[in-house]
Structures are given as structure tokens and as C-alpha cells.
Image (tube, rainbow, N blue to C red):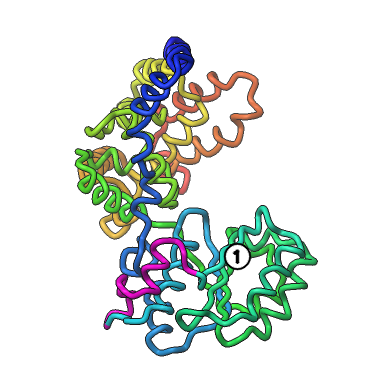
Amino acid sequence: MNTVLKLYTVQASGRFGSLYLHNAFRHMDNFIVSARKYRPQTFDTVVGQSAITSTLKNAIASKHLAQAFLFCGPRGVGKTTCARILAKTINCMDLQPNTEACDKCESCQSFNDGRSLNIYELDAASNNGVDAIRSLIEQVSFAPQLGQYKVYIIDEVHMLSTGAFNAFLKTLEEPPRHAIFILATTEKHKIIPTILSRCQIFDFNRIRLQDIADHLQKIALSEGITAEPEALHVIAQKADGGLRDALSIFDQVVSFSGNNLTYNAVIDNLNILDYDYYFRVTDAIFGKDIKNVLLIYDEILKKGFDGHIFINGLASHFRDLLVCKDPQTLILLETSENVKSKYQSQSQAAPAPLLIQALELYSKCDVQYKSSKNQRLLVELTLMQACSLDPQAEKKNLN
């Protein structure tokens, strides 16, 4: 409040106030969020979608380009980015041997500067009516002044109204040779079949945790930021396969911790339960130490964490321990090498039947949690039952 009052007071003093405000916020003018600053400009720099980028490059090289594409997948995985790169590459006047744009010709420069007339973007979330589509259709008839193609990108295309879809259908069925349509959506099932049948469909995957962590490491090095691998893996896990979300979280944590990105800073800023708690609780369960299990859980609750989040996290922890039991399934464990060694070490302390029995308990607790009138007691009872598990009981029952 004092800072706000100070700014208003200085502003009221005339040109000196304006100068103060200018200097105070000058550093903010130069800041560009990482999602924009490090947005891929070529197919080879797109993260985690190599199958799609290779297919698009082969189509460009062999001149077998479809006139309508549908890019589907979760948010933040590169759909619009790939659409823009495709638009830029097919209009490049000096296409490179690796089927990438040259970034030097007039067409590429106009794309980079955001002044190209060969790309038209429509956000269907806010322009989903018939009038918006009719306006787009009117432009389709005009040939490009520079380059071979005009590319029309319609983002969140599933938001178009039925009337807009019908108005667009005829143009999509018989487009001019110079027009290419790229439709992007997070919900393919909402698009009418007549549109789907006229598009070449590309399904974008969630980006692997390790790919996101590696990309964040490159950005950290570029920005002069020291980052612990565990910290970047936590950010990648929080992003849930979306690179844009990961970059937003990365910026947020850097603002919190400065140029030294530590694991503790990340979990404090994102309010994530430290994995060390799960290792401690698991050691107590394996040792049948009910007292210690209850004390650790009490400590977790006092830190403000929700019991439901804890029990789901513990289930994920036991799942990862089970994965570590077999070298062939170890590849399913997505975490840093340091943490992976801890999992491998702890997984040797319990047989697989015990882990499976414990997972069944946690799953049952998860289902019952929201309807329980005493949620703390439910979790504590689950933990006590886990401490009392007998890995040999299942074998005895079978015999």
C-alpha cells in the first residue's frame, strides 16, 4: 500500500513524477515472457513433436501439401506454432536443403516482423459467428502478392457456430490453389464430420517430461540462470505435458527466486509437497512404525497441505516404487537421475505384493475422501492399515 501511495504522490508532482514512473517501470518494458521469446521459429526447434514436424517437412519437400490441415491436441503443445512455421516455410523464397525457411528472404522477414499479408489468423473463441467466416471467405479469393500461398489459421475451431461451419464448408471443399487452411483445436470431437473428412488430421501429443526439462535447461543457460535438475523436473511435472504452461511457471519461479533456481524455491512457490515426505512416510510404513507415520502426516497438515493431495501423491510414489522393481519398466519413471536412484534404493525394501496392496488402500481412500465426514481420520486409518500390511497374506490366501 505504501508503494502504491508513493507512486501516486510522485505522479501528482508533474513531470518529475512521470520521469520517476518511467524509470521505475523501464525494466518491465524490455521483459518478454519466455513463451514468446523462445517460441520455435523452425520445425527443428519444435519440442516433442518430431513425428509431426518430419511429416510436414516431407510434404513440403515432395510438394504434396494438403489444402486443409487439422491440428489437434492439448493446450500449449505447439499447434499454432507449427501452423505459423508451416506458413512461413512454404512461402520461403530460398528453401534450405533441410526443408527449413532461410529467415533472410523478403517473405521470411515479413513473417518475422509480423507484417506478412500471406497469413491470416482467426480466433474462433471470440469470432465464432457467420460474419467472421464470411469475412475470411471474401479474402480467400485474392491471390498472394508475395510467395505462393495464403495461409488461414483458425484457432479453437471447435468454437465456431453451426452456421459458421456450414458457411465455411463449401470453401473448404473447393479452395483456390493458393489457399491453405490450418484449423487448430483442443476438442476434436466437437468438430462436425463433414469438416473432419476434408482435413489432413495431425494429433499432437503431450510433451514428455524429460523433453520439457531439457528445454527449460537450455533456456536457463541462455538467461544465465543456475537451475537444479530436480527443480526443472518439478516444473515439467506441474505443466502436465504443456510446454507453454511450463514456460509460464518457469518465469513465475524465476521472479520468486532470482537467478538461482533451486528445488526448495520451486516447491515453496508452487506449494508442492516435498517428495522427501513421501520417502519418509514410506520408510515408516515399511518399518511398520505407526507412530512416526502419524507424526509425519500431522507435520504435513500443519504446513497447510490437503490430505487428498497427500494420499494421491503417496499413491503415485508407490506406483513409482513398483515401476522401479523391474529394469524393463524403469523407463516409465519420469524424474531426475538423483531422485531415480532414491526410488530404486527404496523399492528394494518391499516386495511387489506389499506395494500392490498399499496401492489398493490408497485408491480406496481416494474414492471415499470427498464423501467422508472425518477426512483426517480416513487418511490416518489408511496409513495405519498400510503399516499393518502382510506381503505374505496374499500367498497364504491363495494356498
- Name the side, left or right, on which 33 lies relative to 362: left
Residue 222 screen position, x and y as percent: 22, 48
Give residue 172's quadrant in the image: bottom right
Give residue 303's quadrant in the image: top left
- Name the side, left or right, on which 318 lies relative to 342: right
- Per the image, label 1 sits on a secondary structure element best described as strand
Q: Nearer the viewer, residue 2 or 156?
A: 2
Q: Residue at x 48, y 15 (%)?
A: 12
Is residue 278 visible in the rendered image? The answer is: no
Q: Nearer the viewer, residue 375 or 67?
A: 67
Q: Which residues are magenta?
A: 97-116
289 in relation to 54, above or below: above
Q: Is residue 113 magenta?
A: yes
Residue 198 screen position, x and y as percent: 64, 80
Is residue 381 visible in the rendered image? The answer is: yes
Q: Residue at x 36, y 68 (%)?
A: 109
Dominant SS of magenta comes to: loop
For disc 1, the marked residue is 154
254 in relation to 170, above or below: above
- Name the side, left or right, on which 207 lies relative to 174: left
Q: Nearer the viewer, residue 235 or 335?
A: 235
Residue 143 screen position, x and y as percent: 57, 82
